[in-house]
Image (cartoon, rainbow, N blue to C red):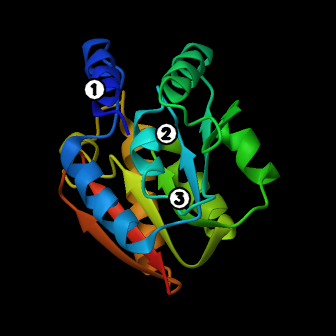
Amino acid sequence: MNTVILEEIKRKALKEHIPIIMDETLEVISKTLQESKPERILEIGTAVGYSAICFSKFLRENGLIDTIERDEQRIKQANENISKLGLENKINIYSGDAVDILPTLDGKYDVIFIDAAKGKYPFFLKQSERLLKSQGIIFADNILYKGYVMSEYNKHKQRTAVRNLREYIKQVTENPNFKTQILEIGDGLAISIRR
């Protein structure tokens, strides 16, 4: 993996205020991926491809990442970044809204990374449970959303996102099929392992 190009992608995204995975969150996920060596990863929310590129180095020999993005401009950037690093055969981008695309998928994934519209997390969870292999792992990023989720936050602007993130936490922690921990790293990370 060309770290110079990777750093450049990261720098450009931060400069343009494109949300990408935080270093400490990436570190935790990378450790897990290194141990589990997944064959198939599903990512909900590609942005410019930074996290998918980072995850790709932990894939098994013929592993594949499917990633979903609806923003045309970001898809274009992600494709450029992926080809700069020669990862076209490891990362496949689905163009469109995850709400429409997820129900059409029927493959099984070792790891699912949720990092898209916060208000849709409960829907993403339902679909992820359907698509996850046994012993598979779901990572949900930004789960504490600037601290709002665990506070009395109730302002109108983010109310739906906060309510649905709380709902996600409730569903996944009460689901007997999962063992879940919520880490206060980055913007909050939920790690759910299928029993």
Q: Taking 38 as reference, is 72 left or right?
A: right
Q: Residue at left 62%, top 16%?
A: 72
Q: CA distance from mark 3 to mark 1?
A: 27 Å
Q: Secondary structure at mark 1?
A: helix
Q: Nearer the viewer, mark 1 or mark 2?
A: 1
Q: Earlier in the sequence, mark 1 or mark 2?
A: 1
Q: Nearer the viewer, mark 3 or mark 1?
A: 1
**Which disc number belongs to residue 112?**
3
**Which disc number belongs to residue 29?**
none
| Residue wearing tag 2 | 116
Q: Earlier in the sequence, mark 3 or mark 1?
A: 1
Question: Percent from the top left, x then y, of residue 177?
Answer: 53, 84
Q: CA distance from mark 1 to mark 2?
A: 27 Å
How many numbered discs, if any?
A: 3
**17 over 31 or under it: above or below:** above
Q: Residue at left 45%, top 39%?
A: 53
The one of 118 and 68 positioned closer to us in this rendering: 68
Whether the residues at callouts 2 and 3 have beta carbons within 8 Å, the answer is no
Question: Percent from the top left, x then y, of residue 168?
Answer: 45, 60
Q: CA distance from mark 2 to mark 3?
A: 12 Å
Q: Secondary structure at mark 3?
A: strand
| Residue wearing tag 1 | 4
